């Protein structure tokens, strides 16, 4: 056998396979970094939503507590033989005496009690109750509004000069 005979090697060398391994490792590292950044972003979003939800349900609890006080004040009124207007006057006196922050709104025949509970610095929970005639058997009140509302007013800034036609 002669030593001078050349061997047939495949089309790639050891260097080519090494570059392929480096490329695959770099792709896996990049995929891992992108997955980690996405997971951290999702965790931050989840934490913010959990905080917002916690603040909302704290405000709902406070609003329900105030609603319980109003209900207790109205339930304590003697209803026998009284006209609705007389009952309404006593109910308003009892409710306004429970706690500050309750506003009485007269709109036509309806009498509405309104109060707000702070959710955050920029949002409030607005509650409105219509006082009903107990002689009709409809209960003491009806919840007319239970809604989140923004405290601040949005102000439009200057438009961006994207396309200006003059």
Image: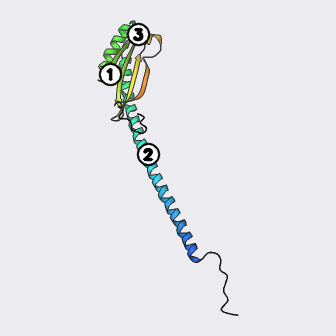
Mark 1 or 2, nearer chain start: 2
Q: Secondary structure at mark 1?
A: loop
Relative image position of residue 28 (x, y in whole percent): 52, 62
Point 35% across, 14% down: residue: 91
Q: CA distance from mark 2 to mark 3?
A: 47 Å
Contact between marks 1 and 3 (CB within 8 A): the answer is no
Q: Closest to the observer: 1 or 166?
A: 166
Q: Nearer the viewer, mark 2 or mark 3?
A: 2
Q: Secondary structure at mark 2?
A: helix
Would you identify the image quadrant in which residue 108 lies?
top left
Dot 3: within a 10 Å radius of its alpha carbon, few (fewer than 14), some, or many (20 or more) residues? few
Picture layout, residue 12 above or below residue 51:
below
Q: Closest to the observer: 108 or 6?
A: 6
Dot 1: within a 10 Å radius of its alpha carbon, few (fewer than 14), some, or many (20 or more) residues? some
Label of residue 39 in the image: none
Mark 1 or 3, nearer chain start: 1
The N terminus: image quadrant: bottom right
Relative image position of residue 116 (x, y in whole percent): 35, 26
**Residue, far right:** 1
Q: Which residue is mark 2?
A: 45
Q: Which residue is mark 3?
A: 109
Label of residue 102 in the image: 1
Across the whole image, how many numbered discs are drawn on residues?
Answer: 3
Q: CA distance from mark 1 to mark 3?
A: 19 Å
The reply, left or right, for residue 87 in relation to residue 16 is left
Q: Secondary structure at mark 3?
A: loop
Would you identify the image quadrant in which residue 125 lies?
top left
Mark 2 or 3, nearer chain start: 2
């Amino acid at each position: 056998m002669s030593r001078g005979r050349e061997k047939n090697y495949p089309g790639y060398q050891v260097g080519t396979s090494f570059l392929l391994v480096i490329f695959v490792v770099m792709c896996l590292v990049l995929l891992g970094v992108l997955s980690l950044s996405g997971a951290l972003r999702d965790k931050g979003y989840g934490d913010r939503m959990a905080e917002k939800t916690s603040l909302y349900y704290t405000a709902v609890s406070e609003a329900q507590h105030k609603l319980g006080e109003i209900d207790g004040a109205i339930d304590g009124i003697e209803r026998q033989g009284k006209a609705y207007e007389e009952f309404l006057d006593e109910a308003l006196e009892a409710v306004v005496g429970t706690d500050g922050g309750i506003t009485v709104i007269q709109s036509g025949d309806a009498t509405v009690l309104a109060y707000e509970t702070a959710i955050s610095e920029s949002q409030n929970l607005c509650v409105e109750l219509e006082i009903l005639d107990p002689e009709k058997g409809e209960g003491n009140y009806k919840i007319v509004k239970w809604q989140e509302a923004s405290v601040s007013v949005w102000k439009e800034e200057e438009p961006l000069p994207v396309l200006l036609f003059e």
